[in-house]
Image (tube, rainbow, N blue to C red):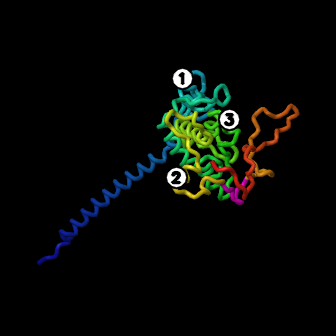
Amino acid sequence: MSSSPRSPWWRWIINTQVKQIARRAGFATAALGLMFVLGCRQDMQDQPKFFPQRGTDFYADGRSVRPQVENTVARNQLHEDGYFSTGLVNGKEGDGMPFPATLEVLERGQERYNVYCTPCHSRVGNGIGMIVQRGYSKAGSFHSERLEKAPLGHFFHVISNGYGSMPDYSAQITPADRWAIVAYIRALQLSQKATQADVPAGAHVEPLPSIAEREGLPASFAGEWTLPPTAVTGTPDNGLFILPTPGAASAGGATPTPTRTNPTTPAGTAGQTVPKQ
């Protein structure tokens, strides 16, 4: 058999395949390079957009910040100036419910009150909740003379905006639920001093000691609440602060001294007792 100077057939096939692979790799590399070049364009950085407080020649008035469309209402600003959303009438705390205080409303108010208010104010609203017993600032008693006379709008306003050591609960509690809590607080207050004339015909007013006895509870249940030594008052006389009323400063610029929020409770001292509600 004579030798041939040409390469074997299988080597030709391999060379052809290698050339095809190289050609495809070249296409892929070119495609990736094109994508890289396109991605590095400055359109993402130099966007045709408006910048706050900068002018523009797009609008005739030269302003980039456009005025709101007439009657536009921003989110969470719908009717925020009304009594339902503020509890205020002409800047003063109103005294009334924006909707009827039905039994359903009171039950909802009780449920929300037990969730958000009892840690400080307790289930009966005497201001000696569990975290107060653990050292937090003493909360106001709803059964003090001041808060018994306070208008309903006061409680709504405090829930919405906070007061003293109490934070605001506007994010946690909707306006409707705040009013439901207000109605329940008033019911708590009325329940402590209710007389037979305050209830419908056929209903019976029963004192707490009688209820405790009927339920088989110890006599101490209807006795006095003990304010533990861990309670914090923040005042030299163990009272609570009443924040100064805006505009109440004297002409000389002196700021009125905060007074106690519960002056009628003689036993506000830590370790002493207060009447059980």
* Disc 2 from disc 3: Cα separation: 32 Å
Q: Mark 1: give few (<14), some (14-19) or many (20+) Cα within 10 Å.
A: few
Say which label, 1 or 2, has the lower sequence index.
1
Q: Which residue is mark 1?
A: 71
Residue 20 in the image: state x and y as whole percent: 27, 59
* Disc 1 from disc 2: Cα separation: 61 Å
Q: For residue 7, say whether it is visible.
A: yes
**Which quadrant does the N terminus fall into?**
bottom left
Label pair 1/2, CB-CB below 8 angstroms: no
Secondary element at image label 3: loop
Left or right: where does residue 213 sit relative to residue 27?
right
Secondary element at image label 1: loop
User: Does residue 225 lie above or below 179 as drawn?
Assistant: below
Say which label, 2 or 3, has the lower sequence index.
3
Q: Please state which of residues 269 and 37 is positioned toward the viewer in this rendering.
A: 269
Secondary element at image label 2: helix
Q: Which residue is mark 3?
A: 149
Q: Which residues are magenta?
A: 225-232
